[in-house]
Amino acid sequence: MPASAFKQVEQAIEKGNPSKSFDILVKKFKREKNYPGVFEARLMKKRIDLGLPAIQTDVIGELSPEARVAYEAEQITAAREVGELFLADGDIYRAWPYFRAIGDRAPVRTALDEYASPSGEEDGIDGIVEIAFHEQVNPRRGFELILEHYGTCRAITNFSHYPSDDGREESGRLLVDQLTSELRDSLKRTIEQHEGAATETDSISQLVAGRDWLFEGNNYYIDTSHVSSVVQMSINWNDPETLRLVLELTDYGRRLGEMYQFKGEPPLEDVYEDSAVYLKALLGEEIDEAVAHFTGKLSSEPDPYGNPAAQAVVRFLVRLERYDAAIEVALQHLKDVPPSQLQCPSVIQLCQLAGDFSRLTELAREQGDLLGYTAGAIQRAS
């Protein structure tokens, strides 16, 4: 620091105006973009105002309640000021610790929405993704950056550990858009080379229809594990446009060679065929056929592990609002499953959803559930 700065501080103190010395420090630190220095100068001034040593010691813990409130308020104000200074310089990574310390995500979330990484530069992107995605400040924007900088494979891995509900559906759509775009482009190039003319359609289903030659010799046009993973993820999504795109992926997937027909978890063992039935039902198509398809796949054999297939079918039926069918599945396959193992609504909850209060009270009595019986009886009488 230049000697003149020390002289200015000394003169302010000699004139009995120590506050002026801190104004000098803050002005100089801002000019030099030494924002942590601004933070420390603000807190040092507050310690002096409270009659504490200028250099922080353990005596901070001995403050009176009133002084503690005043000091903590200054910490928040200083942290916000410094965080905003870093954001004004476009430095989200260094701004975040200050906003995190005061529990305010909003300014950083907004900055992440506006963030655009320099073209062709990867420096610093890891830190931005860590804040946006893994620390859940702006998961959707973080996922966009993962797709942009690390590609589909990394994005799929991260999506399977998506940190919150915030932006999950939008991120799923981004993933599907990228995957279908890559597949569509690859199919179109191959068709043009083979047929000698470009095809206009953007529908994957139409591109593969009637072109069995595309899949001869176990040919594929995008990483097959990526397709399988996204199809299996999609059954938990709701957006109709996204689900229709995934349905097109199943048209492509079931034409792949046998070596690429990956097995899924029951009741979606045949990933592409079963998922197509599932997705069509979610889109309001062939619902009765889907209900029969999945209820017919359930085994009558006891399952000591909570019968996850039956639970999956119950969740599916609840999404379709086929509550009566869900009740029958629960009674037949889940009656002896402990509540701690249920990852779907219990039969009592299903009766509530169905508005079948007579059955609710009947089942609650059988199970010795006095509270459930009371709830059903009150609603039945109203």
Image: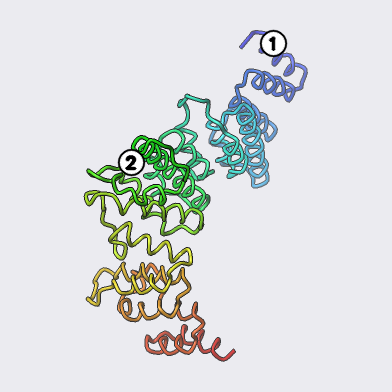
Q: Residue at x 33, y 37 (%)?
A: 194
Q: Residue at x 40, y 87 (%)?
A: 363
| Residue beneath the point at 66% across and 45% down | 69
Label 2's element?
Answer: loop
Q: 128 or 74: which is nearer to us?
A: 128
Image-based side of 20 in relation to 318, left or right: right
Circles 1 and 2: CB distance less than 8 Å? no
Q: Is residue 201 above or below residue 380?
A: above
Of 100 and 329, the residue lying toward us: 329
Q: Quadrant of the N terminus?
A: top right
Between 88 and 11, the residue placed more toward the observer is 88
Density class for disc 2 (Cα within 10 Å; few <14, some 14-19, many ≥20) is some
Residue 85 appears in which quarter of the rendering? Answer: top right
The amino acid sitting under disc 1 is Lys
Specify the amino acid type for callout 2: Tyr
The residue where tag 2 is placed is 221
The answer to whether residue 317 is above or below residue 167 is: below
Indicate the position of residue 236 as horizontal and vertical percent values: 43, 59
Q: Quadrant of residue 323?
A: bottom left
Residue 275 percent location from the top left of the image: 36, 60
Q: Earlier in the sequence, mark 1 or mark 2?
A: 1
**Element marked by disc 1:** helix
Q: Going by the picture, which residue comes out furthest to the front?
A: 196
Residue at (47% x, 45% y) in the render: 202
Which label number is shown at residue 7? 1
Name the residue nearer the viewer: 342 or 184: 184
Q: On residue 153, which mark appears?
A: none
The x and y percentages for residue 291 are 38, 73
